Image: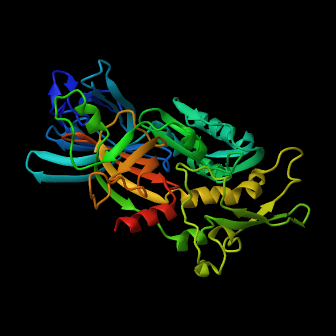
Amino acid sequence: MSRNTTRLFGDKSLTPSSFFLSRCVLTTSDDQNIDIRELVTNITITESLYMGSIDAEFIILDGVNLLEEFKINGDEKISLEIKRKPIDNPVNEVHKHDFYISEVINYARARPGSASYIFRCVSKHAYINNTLTVSGFRDGTIGKIISGICKDLDVKNSDINESTNKVVNCIIPRLRPFAAIKWLNNNSFTTTGAPFYFYETLKEGVKYKSYEDFIDSDPIGTYSHKPFFDKTIGDPEYFNESKFKIRKVSSELNLSKYISTGEGAFASTTHSIDISTKEYKEPKEFAYGSKIKKLNPHKPYPDRADNSQYGGKKISEIKSGKNYFISENKNAYDKNGNINSTLRDNLSTGQSYLSTEDTLSHDITISGNFDLEVGNVINVNVEKTNIGDKGQDHIDKMQSGKYIISTIIHKFGDEYTQQVEIKTNSFNAKLDDILKVNKDEK
């Protein structure tokens, strides 16, 4: 890979897709440091709300017999540093991370004198995860217990929300740390029932945050999908306009109430029995309402006059459509409940969040943004496909609004781009109004 991209003015970037590969050093098992910048043709780094570690792929074009000369065996460290200095900012933006090779794949000799292959890499704590099991008694909030597991994983840079609902006692049944965190997280909620996510970002490291944490954060910018630039390259404003322009968008609309009602997105019933007292508790019913925090003002379904497909009931009243069954054991410990004690009051609400989090989902391609990370909230403006008169509103009210970033694929090649998955659990305008406006405009 060239150590820098084009469209640089001196050491400053004219476009947000420019970058400078300042460091890419492979440390061998005998502590030799090798600069492999000239061997790397592409770098792809993936972070997601659903992954406990970021991972990376380095595509190598090897004309120096690297594998044999330095006895590469598949556990070496790669220290990466990528920089950019915006044209209007004297401070460098930096991505810096240490990866460890987990696999060497796709080896090929396409032509004499060179070989190509891929270093697939993970973070250090993902490597340590494969060397440990977690077991035994733990107590505290689930966030606090997960914070302790992060120390076992030697996580140095973390932001763990320990204010999860209820103090619990549990016995972890000899699981890998990531598996233990997933097991604990299935029972972890805020006081209002929102779920939590354990993930790592390239910018700030390991995090444990709730859906409420995301919603309560300020949007970091407004991204627009429009066909043309207002400014030209070289203008001071061009950098920011290009930075927040959506180059490409594709969507999974997920507008299936058939599926979401079956998942209990809008109504459900929780049944629980205490095995220590043989007590069957009164079923707890859930109906979608104000308790659910939304990114945008309006709920993800319209108020219908005809509900015949739901048996004549409103969509939030079909509580027998999804049932949860919980076994409790309040006498397991002298104080605090066991890990299932969080479920009766929160499971239905948490599942509603998870079932509606991708009410609208888009995959967008944008220029590289060093400040962007999963869990961020962004504003999105999407133009209508049938743009009419100049006086008419060109914004698609249904697809525009606030979104949470769930996945980022950073791609460093000829330029720095990001493929970003964004999701929202609500609409920026009432569906009834959107449908009426669209009908009036025809």
- The answer to whether residue 179 of the structure is visible from this angle is yes
Where does the N terminus fall, quadrant-wise? top left
Closer to us: 150 or 76: 150
> In this rendering, is residue 353 above or below 54?
below
Residue 341 pos. (x, y %): 78, 53
Give the residue displayed 62% in from the left and 78% down from the top: 310
From the viewer's perspective, tell me whether residue 115 is left or right of residue 261.
left
Residue 68 pos. (x, y %): 23, 40
Q: Which colour scheme is used?
A: rainbow
Residue 276 pos. (x, y %): 89, 60
> Among all residues in the image, which is located at the extreme top?
90
Closer to us: 82 or 406: 406
> Among all residues in the image, which is located at the extreme right?
277
Give the residue displayed 67% in from the left and 48% down from the top: 189
Q: Locate residue 306: give its quadrant.
A: bottom right
Give the residue displayed 60% in from the left and 51% down from the top: 182
> In this rendering, is residue 136 above or below 263?
above
